[in-house]
Image (cartoon, helix red, strand yellow):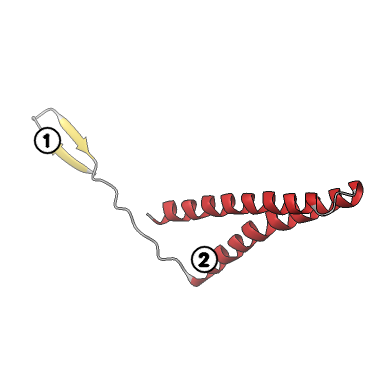
Amino acid sequence: MEFRNNTESDLVFTQKPAMVKRVKATGWEYLGYVGQVGFLVAGPICLGALAGKWIDSSNGWYPKATLTGLGIGFFFSIVGFIQFVREIVKKRT
């Protein structure tokens, strides 16, 4: 903090802007990113396929629900991946 005296009886406090310190990512952080991306992509696709397979087996619609579940899972995995990348880029800048 810096003190500046404008007049004899008037003290004005001015604060210097905070310096932004960039932290270099470690190898463990990158390894964590790889694991998160793996679960973000594989999780929704597997859940969609399993849910579609279950619906197909109970209703006899094979392969319509399985393919629909795969498509929905693929869509959600892409959306999750894009959100994850945006979050990482925002954290790095």
User: Where residue 81 sits in the image (x, y, percent)?
Assistant: 56, 55
Residue in the image at 21% along x and 38% along y: 14
Residue 75 relative to residue 15: left or right: right
User: Where residue 68 sits in the image (x, y, percent)?
Assistant: 73, 49
Residue in the image at 47% along x and 51% along y: 86
Frontmost residue, 72 versus 42: 72
Element type at marker 1? strand
Q: Quadrant location of residue 10? A: top left
Element type at marker 2? helix
Label located before the other in sequence (2 or 1):
1
Few, some or many C-alpha atoms within 10 Å of disc 2 (few <14, some 14-19, many ≥20)? few
Give the quadrant of the N terminus. Answer: top left
Q: Which residue is mark 1?
A: 5
Q: Disc 2 residue type?
A: Glu
Q: Nearer the viewer, mark 2 or mark 1?
A: 2
Is disc 2 in contact with disc 1, using a CB cutoff of under 8 Å? no
Few, some or many C-alpha atoms within 10 Å of disc 1 (few <14, some 14-19, many ≥20)? few
Q: Quadrant location of residue 15? A: top left
Give the quadrant of the C terminus. Answer: bottom left
Q: How many marks?
A: 2
Q: Quadrant location of residue 23? A: bottom left
Frontmost residue, 91 versus 85: 85
Q: Is residue 35 above or below residue 79?
A: below
Labelled disc at residue 93: none
Q: Which residue is mark 2?
A: 29
Residue in the image at 52% along x and 66% along y: 29
Frontmost residue, 20 versus 93: 93
- Toward the left, the furthest residue is 7
- Toward the bottom, the furthest residue is 27
Residue in the image at 47% along x and 55% along y: 88
User: Where residue 78 sits in the image (x, y, percent)?
Assistant: 58, 53
Q: Disc 1 residue type?
A: Asn
